[in-house]
């Protein structure tokens, strides 16, 4: 778990450094910086989405994921949590981007082959090298994101720890399930959500990204199901 712990600490420390930077950045710069991060998110999302191999699985994941998210009211629950956090941490009562910072950082830090493969390597082989590389990248990202999006980025350390730690601890059991095709489809679905975040940040769309979050995990079920159906034809 050393790689997971290091990654989690890097997000927290990077976020704390970013909070200091946020205080020295003029408020008038905030909008243009957020849009710049949004453009980067769109680029990262498009790049990651190209990993997808099966459009049908992507469609099914997004549709059923949205239905699950809407049924569980994930976006509303996050907004409620964000409101409580903003009251506690935003003493000035100014505009806060807690939810946006949390979702953006969580997706960018948790979605992708580096997260899954790095955690599997740590759990199966004791090789933390990929997670250490990711640690450095996430630490720097946390500084930049927190400086513009606020304290919500620091709380992305929670899903980083849970997802990476869960994969490490369950590596032997879930490695047969997390095949290359499954990881690619998960990355594709997650990357499209990153694009949606980028659109929200740059052009002001109102996509409820949190409601689509279950779509990231549905390829774990849909890929084997699709392969089984194809084998019957």
Image: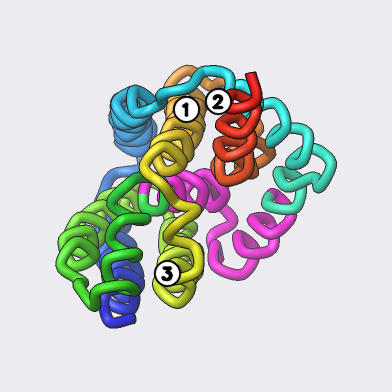
Give the Cα distance between marks 3 and 2.
Answer: 25 Å
In this rendering, would 119 be left or right of 207?
A: left
- The mark nearer the N terminus, 3 or 2, is 2
Between 98 and 54, the one nearer to me in the picture: 54
Q: Main secondary structure of the magenta part?
A: helix
Give the Cα distance between marks 1 and 3.
Answer: 26 Å
- The x, y position of residue 176, in whole percent, is 45, 56
SS class, disc 2: helix
Judging by the rendered image, the residue that carries numbered circle 3 is 171
In this rendering, would 85 be left or right of 11?
A: right
- The x, y position of residue 5, in whole percent, is 33, 79
Judging by the rendered image, the residue that carries numbered circle 2 is 58
Judging by the rendered image, the residue that carries numbered circle 1 is 192
Q: Quadrant of the N terminus?
A: bottom left
In this rendering, would 219 be left or right of 154?
A: right
In this rendering, the label closer to the viewer, 2 or 1: 2
Residue drawn at x 45%, y 51% is: 178
Count of picture labels: 3
SS class, disc 3: helix
- The x, y position of residue 147, in whole percent, is 31, 52
Q: What is the span of residues highlighted in magenta in the rendered image?
A: 79-108
Between 176 and 141, the one nearer to me in the picture: 176
User: Could you say which quadrant of the image residue 191 lies in?
Assistant: top left
Between 183 and 215, the one nearer to me in the picture: 183
Residue drawn at x 81%, y 47% is: 72
Residue drawn at x 60%, y 60% is: 86
Asked whether the beta carbons under mark 2 and mark 1 sit within 8 Å of each other, the answer is yes
Characterize the local packing of mark 2: few (<14), some (14-19) or many (20 or more) Cα atoms within 10 angstroms.
Answer: many
**230 shown above or below 25:** above
């Amino acid at each position: 778990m050393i790689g997971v712990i290091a990654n989690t600490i890097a997000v927290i420390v990077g976020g704390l450094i970013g909070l200091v930077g946020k205080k020295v950045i003029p408020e008038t710069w905030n909008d243009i910086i957020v849009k710049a991060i949004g453009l980067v998110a769109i680029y990262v999302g498009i790049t990651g989405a190209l990993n997808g191999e099966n459009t049908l699985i992507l469609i099914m994941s997004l549709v059923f994921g949205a239905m699950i998210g809407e049924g569980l009211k994930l976006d509303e629950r996050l907004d409620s949590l964000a409101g409580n956090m903003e009251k506690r941490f935003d003493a000035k009562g100014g505009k806060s981007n807690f939810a946006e910072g949390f979702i953006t950082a969580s997706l960018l830090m948790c979605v992708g082959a580096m997260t899954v493969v790095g955690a599997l390597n740590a759990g199966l082989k004791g090789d933390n090298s990929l997670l250490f590389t990711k640690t450095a990248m996430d630490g720097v990202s946390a500084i930049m994101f927190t400086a513009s999006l606020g304290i919500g980025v620091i709380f992305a350390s929670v899903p980083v720890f849970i997802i990476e730690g869960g994969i490490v601890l369950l590596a032997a059991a879930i490695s047969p399930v997390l095949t290359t095709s499954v990881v690619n489809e998960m990355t594709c679905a997650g990357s499209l959500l990153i694009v949606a975040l980028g659109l929200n940040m740059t052009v002001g769309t109102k996509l409820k990204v949190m409601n689509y979050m279950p779509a990231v995990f549905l390829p774990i079920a849909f890929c084997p199901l699709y392969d089984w159906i194809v084998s019957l034809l």
